[in-house]
Image: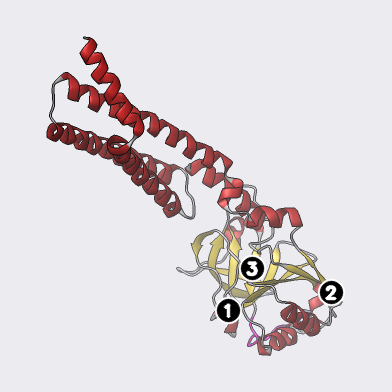
Amino acid sequence: MFLCFRQNEQRNNESRLNRNGLSVNSLIVNQAQDQPLQTTIQQIAKSPLKNYQLQFVSRKDPNFSYIYAKGDVNSTLPLISGRFFNQHDYESEVPFVVLGSNLTKQTYQPQAQQYYQLNHNYYAVIGVTGVGENSAINQHTFVSLSPNQTLDSAIRTGQFRIIYDPSTQKASDTKKVLQIFHATGTKRLVDSSSIKRERQGWFDRSGMIITQIILLLALMIIVTWILAYLVIFASKQFNLGSFLQNQLSLKTLGQLAAHLILATGIGFVIGWQTQKINRPEVILTILLLFVLITLISAYLYLTHSHHYTHLKQVLNSNKKQG
């Protein structure tokens, strides 16, 4: 179960890493007017737009991006150390840098703080991102933008591919972005098939998990039936009264509960340590619900099942024949 969840997460994470952590809501701003980047950021900061991210990806070097964001954003990147940009960075007078793991050798570190040289200036590195060995994100440089920074007037929007990533798409907000950039329109960064896959719930893309749950449930039904048979057989074989028979049933259920909880706990810890996923509590909840439902089902089967009554009659008739 952990492996299935991990495979689903890896598939979506790899897709997001290939577009610098941008979400499926991302829009490419087409044919924006060439204007100074600093004045553009100042206009955006003064606008009523909120809960969005803008990435300016260099056309000359696709491994370099300026980032500006406001409010809650969808962007997520795996960090090896440090942190990603926060709202204070997007209001700071100086830029900060998040580097891909392969670029850390190019930093200058006089003491504890790393610095990265950019346009003949050194800027503080606040985080290192990266994954695996061959991911493009390991070579990427992210630099924060702020309306309070003083950028070279030679840095203009025409030098970048502009990507607008809102937390929630709104036609009015997109229209405002187009007005600020004097752009003709937008197009989706992510194709429709990727959007559909990433927006699928775990139920839609986890057929293997569902199969595992069904098989486990079938196994527990068989185990419960065997337990019922053993309880009845022991009751008749040793002439147990109703009180002792109930005690035997409760003890059997107690042993079943102990074994289930122990096995579930061991399996969860092993899966948690070997298959790192973002939401292990989801699997834990599923497993605990499964254990609870199994125990309730076993109890009801031992006390109210038609098959349980039928087993009693069969064993009674066999005893009389003997």
Circle 3 — which element?
Answer: strand
User: Which residue is at 47% across, 33% downward?
Assistant: 215
Ranked by sequence position, the earlier of labels 3 and 1 is 1
Measured as percent of width and height from the top left, residue 31 is found at 86, 74
CA distance for labels 1 and 2: 24 Å
User: Which residue is at 38% across, 33% downward?
Assistant: 220
Circle 2 — which element?
Answer: strand
Question: Residue 249 vs residue 241: left or right?
Answer: right
Question: Residue 267 vs residue 299: left or right?
Answer: right
Ranked by sequence position, the earlier of labels 2 and 3 is 3
Q: For residue 231: magenta?
A: no
Q: Which residue is mark 3?
A: 142
Measured as percent of width and height from the top left, residue 50 is found at 63, 81
User: Which residue is at 62% across, 56% downward?
Assistant: 138
Dominant secondary structure (helix, strand or loop) of the stretch shown in magenta: loop
User: Which residue is at 58% across, 47% downward?
Assistant: 8
CA distance for labels 2 and 3: 26 Å
Q: Quadrant of the C terminus?
A: top left
How packed is label 1: few (under 14 Cα within 10 Å), some, or many (20 or more)? few
Could you tell me how many numbered marks the image carries?
A: 3
Residue type highlighted by circle 1: Gly
Q: Are marks 3 and 1 in contact (CB under 8 Å)?
A: no
Magenta segment range? 146-151
How packed is label 2: few (under 14 Cα within 10 Å), some, or many (20 or more)? some
Q: Which residue is mark 2?
A: 185
In this orientation, does residue 132 appear?
no
Q: Which numbered dot is residue 71?
A: 1
Which residue is at the front of the view, 196 or 22?
196
Measured as percent of width and height from the top left, residue 302 is found at 28, 35
Q: Nearer the viewer, mark 3 or mark 1?
A: 1
